[in-house]
Amino acid sequence: MSAAVTSGGGLPLEFARLLIDWQRLHGRSGLPWQNTRDPYRVWLSEVMLQQTQVSTVLSYFHRFLERFPTVEVLAEASADEVMALWAGLGYYSRARNLHRCAQAVVAEHGGVFPSNASALQTLPGIGASTAAAIAAFCHGERVSIVDGNVRRVLSRLLAFDGDLAQTAAQRKLWDLAQALLPAEPLPDDMTAYTQGLMDLGATLCLRSRPQCERCPVQPICRAHASSTVSNYPVKTRAVKRRHESWWLLLLRGAAAAGGERIWLVRRPSTGIWASLYCPPVFDSEAALIDALPTPWREGLRELEPVAHSLTHRELRLHPRLLVLDTAGPGPVGLDGAWVDAEALHSHGLPAPVRVLLGSWLKSLPP
C-alpha cells in the first residue's frame, strides 16, 4: 500500500476526493430529501434523522410534507397538530423546536431560511451540524457536518484518541473536520462530500462490524492500518440508565352521542413525553387507586406491563383499565379531560400509549 499524501498538519489530502468519487458511484441518491436545494425539505429531514433510522423517517417525512408543504404552513399550525403528527417518532423536543424554528423563520426572516451556517445556528433547534448540512446541501457552503456518525468516521480515519465525552476534544475534532474539506469545492462537490460523510457512517463505518473491506478510504484509514478500528471513537463517560415504574390509569367511558371516550391529561412542558397527551400517571398502584372514587375501584382491571426504553431511562408501564358504562364526569380532583376516541388522532400520544389504547379501542387509527 502506498503512503497517503498528507497536509502539513498530517491530514490525508485525498480523503475528500475519495469520498466524493465514492458517493457519486455508490452512495445513496434516491431518498426523498435528496436532489433538492430547498432548505425547508433539507432542514425537516435533518431534524427527523437525528438519532432516528432512515426507514423510520421516510413515512413521517411524507406525512409532514403533505400536511405542512411550506415553512409558512408549519408556522401557522397549532402545537397540538404538530405534536400529533410527530407522535411515535420520539425525542419530542425536536418537534417543539421544529415548530418554534418555523415560526422564527417566518417572523424574523420573511419565510426564507438564512443562507449560511452561522446565521442558521441562531434559529431554535438548529445546532452546528444541522446548520452545516443545510448550508452545504442548499448553498454549497464549505463547512462540514460533524454528527455522531461523522465523529465515528473521522475518529477512525485519523485515529483520533481525544475523549469525545469532553468538550475540548469535540472542538478539536470539529476543527479537523473543517480542515479535511475539499479545497475549492463546487456546490455539487459539497453536496456529494456531505452526503458521502452521512452514507459512509450509516452504511459502512458502522459502530459494530464495520465493513472496512468495502470502505473507499480504507487505504488511508489510520485505525484500520493499526488494526484498532474497534478502539474508536473514544468516549469514556458511560450513560447512566435509570429504571422507573409508572402506573397508568386507562379510563374509558361512553360518549354522550354514542361511541367511546378516553380520559387524557397533558404532560408538563418538560420531562418525559413533554406536552404530549397521556392517561394519568402515578408512581404506585396505591396512588392510582386512591385517586378513584371508592365505587369505581372494584372495576379496575390489570393489563400486561409494557417495557419502554428511552435515551437514559427504562420505563416499566403498568396499565390499569377502568371501563365506565355511563357518560358521566371523570374522577373528582383528577387532572385531565375526556377525549372522544374519534378525536385521538389529533392529539400527540406517546408511542407506547398509542399501542395500549389501540389494543382495546377499534376506533383508534394505527
Image: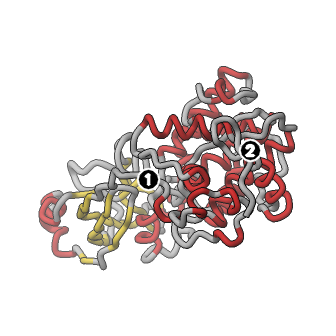
Does dot 2 land on a helix, a strand or a loop? loop
**Is any atom of residue 85 visible in this view?**
no
Residue at screen point 78% across, 54% down: 18
Give the quarter of the image for residue 314: bottom left
Q: What is the distance, in whole Å, between disc 1 and disc 2 at their CAs?
A: 24 Å
**Is any atom of residue 109 visible in this view?**
yes
- Left or right relative to 108: residue 286: left
Residue, disc 2:
13
Give the quarter of the image for residue 303: bottom left
Q: Nearer the viewer, residue 89 or 361?
A: 89
Does dot 1 land on a helix, a strand or a loop? loop
Work out whether 190 lies above or below 255.
above
* Front position among marks 1 and 2: 2
Mark 1 and mark 2 lie on one chain; the one further toward the N terminus is 2
Q: Which mark is residue 234?
A: 1
Residue at screen point 36% across, 47% down: 267
Work out whether 300 lies above or below 224.
below
Residue at screen point 57% across, 47% down: 147
At label 2, the amino acid type is Leu
